[in-house]
Image (tube, rainbow, N blue to C red):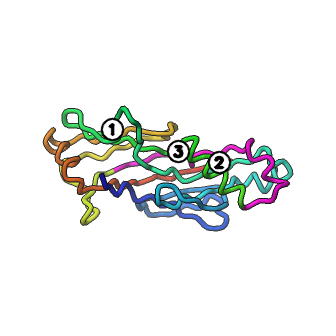
Amino acid sequence: MEFLLCNFVVFAEEQIYLVERDNSSLATAVINTQISTVFNYDDTQVYIYGALSNEKENSLTPKQWIFYYVPVMAPVQQEDTTWICTTKNELRIELLFGNDDISELARQAIMKTYDLNVTQYAKFWDVVPLMIDSLMAYIAKRSSSIPVEGIHPFGTVVPNALSMIFRFTCSSEEKAKAIIQFKLFFILLDLNKSQLIL
């Protein structure tokens, strides 16, 4: 199956001290971090941010450092289940924000940016997905990025699991099944004011 899963953008610069945009977009973010590095996962670049405390109050104690990566939003691949299905008039899509393997890929990418004096503490670092305050997901037409009629968006506040089932209520059971059958959609995410207070 080929699906374009999401447009996921985090606005970032070298250092951001709680910068907020006035207008909403696919991903509006407020971040108190600093870009550290990037790694590839499933043919996608994943940005890693270091907590500003790593360079301030914890600068002399790299054992206490914290890093965040942008949630990967990839399909959950398990042998015994499918990541996309329907139940009556509901379309369910299970997406992964992060897991131990992704955290380890991020850790390895971070380690490449430091010398041995710092990387000796890498096993103690917290490397976790970036916190999302709230999100709204839409099923959109692949050809135009316009939300598909008859499918309600899915929203949640402060998702804190490493994966989540997005539940889209459809106008009919046939509509839900057609989305899976024709594979002509992708998920638009609207992230509202993701915020890290470190």
**Element at label 2:** loop
Callout 1 crowding tier (Cα within 10 Å): few <14, some 14–19, many ≥20: few
Foreground disc of the pair 1, 3: 1
Considering depth in this image, is 82 or 196 the residue closer to the camera? 82
Residue position for label 2: 197
Residue 169: where, in percent of width, then height? 24, 40
Q: CA distance from mark 2 to mark 1?
A: 36 Å
Residue 161 in the image, given as x and y percentages of width and height: 50, 36
> Mark 1 sits on what residue?
82
Q: Which residues are magenta?
A: 113-137
As drawn, is 86 to the left or to the right of 44?
Answer: left
Of pointers 1 and 3, the one earlier in the residue sequence: 1
Give the CA distance from mark 3 to mark 2: 20 Å
Per the image, is 135 magenta?
yes
Q: Which residue is mark 3?
A: 98
Using the image, tell me which numbered label, if any, was put on residue 21.
none
